[in-house]
Amino acid sequence: MSVRSQGGELSVPLEPISLSRRDAHGVRPARIIWLDNEEALIRCASRLLSEYLKDYRLIPCVNGDDALREIDRQPPDLLVTDYHHPGARLTEMLLRLEERPARFPVLLVSVCAGPEDLNHLRSASTFTIELLGELGCGTLIPAVLKHLTASKPPPPGEEADNSKQDVRFRG
């Protein structure tokens, strides 16, 4: 299957890719916390993710306090947020996260933030932080796959098969 993206044609797998995780309690869906005050953006992201991925749970949070409560309850496998989120200053939130033992990748969705903003955040944090320019299947899906399938162990009884996880972009 292929769809049009800004950079040209996007080749995607015919079947959704599993993001299931194995932990001490068995196999579970990946947890993705999406922090954004724009509910429409969260719905859009949810539709994008569900088209190409499976075995994940998207947890929407509208402010930093909600996200921190979710993180304290059960750390996510991935945090996605806007750099200029009015309900959560990212630098303050990263400082609060540094006090917690859990580490997970952070994806910033922002057309306003630039390399200097990213460098500032990285220098003040021990988290892996990646900047996505705009939200679309050409940026979101590869970033999620990069962070949630790179070292993912196969589910019990299955061997690792990364051939289905080869998402290529031309353009």
Image (cartoon, rainbow, N blue to C red):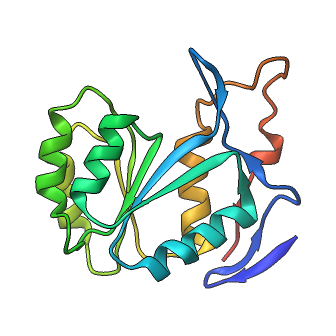
Measured as percent of width and height from the top left, residue 57 is found at: 58, 49
- Name the one closer to the observer, 44 or 13: 44
Measured as percent of width and height from the top left, residue 36 is found at: 35, 70
Does residue 128 appear in the picture of this structure? Answer: no
Task: State the residue at coordinates (64%, 63%).
Answer: 49
Left or right: residue 135 compared with residue 116 = right
Task: State the residue at coordinates (55%, 65%).
Answer: 140
Q: Is residue 159 above or below residue 17?
A: above
User: How many circles with numbers are drawn on the protein?
Assistant: 0
Measured as percent of width and height from the top left, residue 48 is found at: 64, 70
Measured as percent of width and height from the top left, residue 37 is found at: 33, 75
Task: State the residue at coordinates (28%, 45%).
Answer: 69
Name the image quarter holding residue 92: bottom left
Left or right: residue 151 compared with residue 157 = left
Name the image quarter holding residue 107: bottom left
Q: Is residue 112 above or below residue 79?
A: below
- Name the one closer to the observer, 38 or 13: 38
Does residue 140 appear in the picture of this structure? Answer: yes
- Position of the C terminus by quadrant: bottom right
Left or right: residue 112 compared with residue 164 = left
Name the image quarter holding residue 16: bottom right
Q: Is residue 101 above or below residue 87?
A: above
- Position of the N terminus by quadrant: bottom right
Task: State the residue at coordinates (39%, 44%).
Answer: 105
